[in-house]
Amino acid sequence: MYRALYWSDEPAVMLLDQTRLPAESVELSCPDVASLVDAIKRLAVRGAPLLGIAGGYGIALAVARGEDVETAAYDLAHARPTAVNLTKGVVRVFAAYRDSGGDPAATLAAARALHAEEDAAAEALATHGLTLIEPGARVLTHCNTGALATGGAGSAFGVALAAHKAGKLAHLWVGETRPLLQGARLTAWEAAAHGIPHTVLVDGAAASLMSTDQVDLVLVGADRIAEDGTVANKVGTYGLAVVATYLGIPFVVVAPCSTIDLATPQAAAITVEQRDATEVTTFAGQLVTPADSPAWNPAFDLTPAGLITALVTERGVLRHPDRAGIAELVAR
Ligand code: MRU
């Protein structure tokens, strides 16, 4: 239906430019690492698992182009700080490059293997996640977790899509996701493409929606899951979790195991990306605040494990995730 990212033997990493959606579907060719790093920073490609895939192909691109691969690995891994998949993808494919003695074919094969694993994980996420969906479910989601953000059909969105295909999903509520509107621009676009009945709401309306018995389940993705189960995800997620817990609505995180980072013990060890204030102070190119008003623009927030009803991974469903449960899951 649409491909968020693929390898071209040109060589180049080809992206569906997510900054242009939903107005235009435009492919962006990244023929070198600098252009790919720029695309990652601008969110032309985004979403934790897809960033991992992009980072992996980025190393293959550096090798194929004869660029300095160590510099490429550093630049790719540091393009954005919060999604652990990006670093993991870069490190994994860099290891294949090093272990193969710098062989381009072996490096590309490692990037392709990573991509295939994420595709397979997404399929398993949908299967496991579907077991949590009751017939007639009204689901609220946040940010974008579909094929534009992952391998395969998505994480949280992939579960909603599977529920839709199984005839179990009554409605998908889509939080717009200020300030870059990944929900309004991207999730609504993917929902429309799949014929999923959906409604976009401003982030500030979510609490009211949930309190008026219009949501049965909240489904979100993750950018990094710490060893203690803390979930870093798009800013606004924590607020949804607090409200869902207060109202007794299940709050479910859907993410591949590649997003779990055992090297991050708890929330304090997670770097939350701070983005440019102009993303908040302007809208569609127009200044919407007084010229001198500063803005605080964290891209992510941190949800404690205690607010999470279940974590869905490709290895199964972990109810009430905590440090022990995460350790057992990763060891499975
Ligand atoms: O800043 P973004 O658009 O890269 O943030 C993406 C998210 O927060 C997603 O929810 C997360 O990466 C999970 S994608 C399956």
Image (spheres, rainbow, N blue to C red):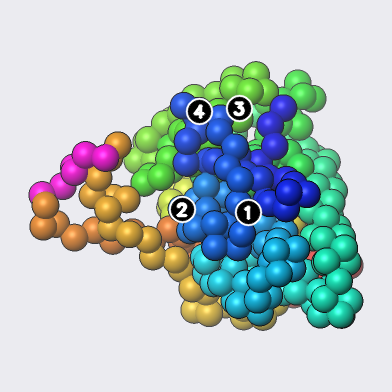
Which label sits on residue 24? 4
Q: Of marks 3 and 1, which one's residue comes earlier in the chain?
A: 1
- Residue type, numbered disc 2: Arg
Compared with 304, 191 (above or below) is above
Q: Earlier in the sequence, mark 4 or mark 1?
A: 4
In the image, is residue 299 above or below residue 77?
above
Q: Amino acid at mark 3?
A: Ala
Some atom of ligand 1 lies within 8 Å of the CB belonging to the residue at label 2: no
Q: Main secondary structure of the magenta part?
A: loop
Whether residue 94 is visible: yes
Quarter of the picture containing the C terminus is: bottom right
Between the residue at mark 4 and the residue at mark 2, the CA separation in whole angstroms equals 17 Å
Q: CA distance from mark 3 to mark 1?
A: 31 Å
Left or right, 294 with reference to 165: left
The residues colored magenta run 285-290
Pointers 4 and 1 in contact (C-beta within 8 Å): no
Choose mark 2 or mark 1, whichever is in front. 1
Residue 136 screen position, x and y as percent: 67, 23
Residue ID for mark 2: 42
Snapshot quadrant of residue 322: bottom right
Mark found first going from the N terminus, 3 or 2 = 2
Q: CA distance from mark 3 to mark 4?
A: 16 Å
Query: Marks 4 and 1, how far apart in space?
Result: 21 Å
- Residue where numbered disc 1 is placed: 31
Residue occupying image coordinates x 46% and y 61%: 301
